[in-house]
Image: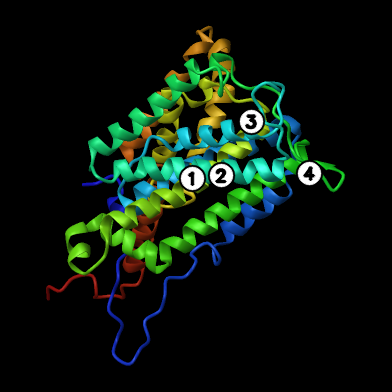
Amino acid sequence: MSLAHDARVTIRPAAAGQRPKLRGWPEINNPAAWIVAAILLIMPLIANGFFLIEIFATTLILGIMALSLMFLAGYGGMVSLMQLTIAGFSAYMVAVFGVSGNANISLGWPWWLAVPMALALATLFGTLGGALAVRTEGIYTIMITLAIGAAFYYFTNQNWAIFNGHTGINTVATPHFWGVNWRADIPFYYIVLAVAALCYFAVEYISRAPFGLALQGVRDNPRRMAALGFNVNAHRVAAYAFASFVAALAGVLQVWNYRQISPGSVSVGACIDILIIAVVGGITRPIGPFIGALIFVLLRTFALDFLVKLGLDGNRFRLLIGLGFLAIVFWSSDGVIGLWQSWRQRQRSGAARSSGRHGRGPGQGSGHG
């Protein structure tokens, strides 16, 4: 069974005389979604700068990166480990074409020219990597994308003319326009929130559009889709192009957040972290990567202090992340979302059995006379 097996779309024939209905937006009629949206909008009123940026903004940025992986794995059946690499490439391009403390490397373009160039080059980089990866399947796709990520890490670590070696590029300039410093905590949080919302709804929309449905058909049965006249590789490469653009947006936000980019940001371990985030949250729904990112950021931020209070080495905080990952995957093949859906199903089943018992009248409990 593939990692994204449960993400498939079930198409049921319409009853006679009825027009088939398109899938709706499940979150619109969900009160919990509106509550979460309202909390996110008013977050600057209830959270200080640390929680606003280091917890929630970082969660959204990592969630966008994991969302690009979720789109490929959940709807395309392609597990890519180079999504963080694409984001890092985009971040490097912002630093190279824009303004930074390394004047001998950065070209000094204004941000409104540097950012589109970075997005275009990162999308092209990810699309070319995807064109290589789609010629393989399963574990070979994972290995090719991981190899691309590892090669980029070592290249940035050793190249000084463009990437400034292991030191990286520091003091990257952030946007200032309309008299607003958009890297200030509150403006930057709303920029990140807006980009995350746009990416989320774009993935939701594409998953229901003809291209998204065809991509899911390619995932489930590529031979049948090819026999129907669909270009399987073209759909897969197009999926990589879209996912690369999403990851590139996260890379721009990441370099604005930290104001620097270095090889450590695109290491192999960091690439695998994005996979962990996507799997822990849930690989079949666009909200899953953001749930996984929140869990990951909370553990990464507070697990160290928790271990120190217990008298343990704080550097072993990744042990807690690993144990949490193993526990969630052991109990659910679809991460936290799968656990939630299983719990809801048990609750509904229990309620149905309870109502069935209470609904029986006298003499209805047995068929024996």
Going by the numbered disc 2, the residue's amino acid type is Leu
Mark 4 belongs to which amino acid? Leu
Which residue bears the numbered disc 2?
119
Query: Which is more N-terminal, label 2 or label 4?
Result: 4
Q: Which mark is residue 143?
A: none
Amino acid under disc 3? Ala
Contact between marks 1 and 2 (CB within 8 A): the answer is yes
Question: What separation in Å lies between label 4 and label 3 (alpha carbons)?
Answer: 32 Å
Label 1, label 2: how many angstroms apart (C-alpha)? 6 Å
The part of the image, by quadrant, that contains residue 322 is top left
Residue drawn at x 27%, y 79% is: 13
- Mark number displayed over residue 45: 4
Q: In the displayed structure, does residue 7 sit left or right of residue 46?
A: left
The residue where tag 3 is placed is 95
The quarter holding residue 279 reads top left
Front disc: 4 or 2:
2
Q: Earlier in the sequence, mark 4 or mark 1?
A: 4
Question: Residue 272, position in %: x, y?
Answer: 40, 29
